[in-house]
Image: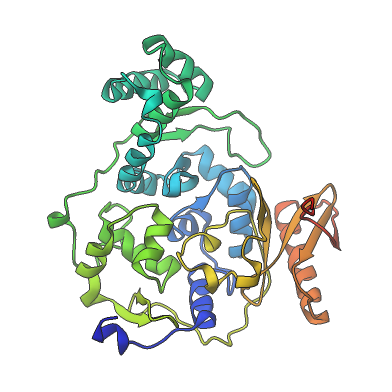
Amino acid sequence: MTKTTASAPVLGPRALNRATLDRQLLLRRSGMSAKAAVGHLLGLQAQNVKPPYYALAARLDGFAPEELSALMADREVVRIVTMRSTIHTHTAEDCLTLRPLVQPARDRELTQFRKGLDGVDLDRLAVLARDLVESEPRTMKELREALLVEWPDADPQALAVAARCKLPLVQVTPRGLWGRSGQVALTTAEHWLGRPADPAPPAEHRPTDPARPTSTSTPAPDATVLRYLAAFGPASVKDMQTWAGLTRLREAFERLRPELRVFRDEHGVELFDLPDAPRPAEDTPAPPRFLPEFDNLLLSHADRTRVVPKEYWGRSWQGNQAYCTLLVDGFLAGVWKLDGDTLVVEPFGRLTRAQRGEVTEEGQRMVATLYPGQPYDIRFGTVVQQRAT
C-alpha cells in the first residue's frame, strides 16, 4: 500500500453501495431520456431482448418500452458485442467508440479458436465477411456457410466467431424491438449507422483535460475511465478492467490521478472517483428495485460486495440459467420471474412486513410500466429450482 493510499479516506460496503446506486439511477428514478440513460450507463446488458427494457424501467421516471424500441428502430441505439464479449445495447455514438476500445479483448478471444482457424487468413476473412453482411444482413448460420466455401477445412463455429471478433457486427432490427420478434441478423456498425468507427488514438494523443474525456465521441481510455467512474464509481483499476474485459488500464488511471479523488476500501484497495461525483451517506434510503438478469450493476466490479452480500454469492444463477434480481436496501436480496400473469418473487432471506409491502408496490409499478393494462398477480414463492442432491 502506498503512503498516499494509506492516508486516503475509507469507504465501507454501504458507502460504496449508496454511491454506486446513485450513479446507476437506482436511489431515485431519473428524468433522463432513454437515450441519455443508455449513454450515461455506458450501455445495458442485452444477451436477451427484454433486459434493457427492464433495466430502464427500474431507473427512469415515466419510461415506456416503446421509447427504447423507437430508438432502436431509428438506429440511435444498437445491439453489439462489446464489454466482456457480451451483447450490449449502446447508443450509436458509443457503439462507434467503445467497440474499437475493446478490440484488444476481441483479439484475445480469437486465440481460443486458433486450432479451428488453422490456415485461415484473418484479414481476408474480415474482408469477405464485411462484403457478405454489408450486401445484406446475415445470420450466423449464413455467415458460417459462406465462409466455409473459402475455408472448407476450418471449424465452422470458429469462422463465425472470427468474423464477430474482427468486425463490429450489430444486430439489425426487428431483433430487439419491444413486442416484436426476429432472428439475429448481422451487419457492420458502420454500414448500419452510415458513418465510420472512431479508432482509439495512441496514448500520447489521448486527452488529459478532464473536460474533454467526458465526451462520448472520444474513444480514448482516459475518456472511458471518467465515464466509468461517473456510472460505477468509486472504483479500483481492477474494477474497471472487470467491467470492460480489458487489462493494462493502470496507465490511464495514473494519467488522470491529479484530477481524481482517491479513497480506499476496508481491505486497503485504492479506489478512484470524480471529485464532484455524488457519495451519499450510507444510511440514505434505497428503495427496492427489480433488475433484469446480468444487470451491469452486479457485474462491473472485481469486488462485488458493494451490491452482493457474500452469503448470496452465486444465488442469482444456476448452471447456465441466470435469474432476474431483486434489490432490497440496495443489496441483492432475491430473484424474480414473470410466470404467465403472475410476478413471482423469491427473497433469499426474511423480509419485514414493511419491506414486503415496498417490494409488492415496486413490483406493481414495474409490471404496470412494461405491460400497461395487463393484470398481474404478485406472489412470494420459489423461482430457483432446487438442485438435485
- Residue 197 in which image quadrant: top left
* Residue 388 x/y as whole percent: 79, 50
Residue 277, compared with residue 52, is above or below; it is below
Residue 85, compared with residue 173, is above or below; it is below
- Residue 336 in which image quadrant: bottom right
Residue projecting furthest to the left: 204
Q: Name the residue: 66% across, 35% down.
A: 180
* Residue 113 x/y as whole percent: 40, 31
- Residue 267 in which image quadrant: bottom left
Residue 350, compared with residue 37, is above or below; it is below
In the image, taking residue 289 as reference, residue 166 lies left or right, namely left
Q: Name the residue: 40% across, 44% down.
A: 92
Figure label count:
0
Q: Quadrant of the N terminus?
A: bottom left
Is the image coloured rainbow, by chain, by secondary structure, or in one colour?
rainbow
In the image, taking residue 153 as reference, residue 47 lies left or right, namely right
* Residue 324 x/y as whole percent: 68, 56
* Residue 66 x/y as whole percent: 62, 47
Can residue 139 be seen here? The reply is no
In the image, taking residue 292 as reference, residue 251 lies left or right, namely left
Closer-to-camera residue (45/137)? 45
Q: Name the residue: 55% across, 30% down.
A: 184
Residue 74, compared with residue 310, is above or below; it is above
Closer-to-camera residue (246/290)? 246
Q: Name the residue: 50% across, 24% down.
A: 140
Can residue 166 be seen here? The reply is yes
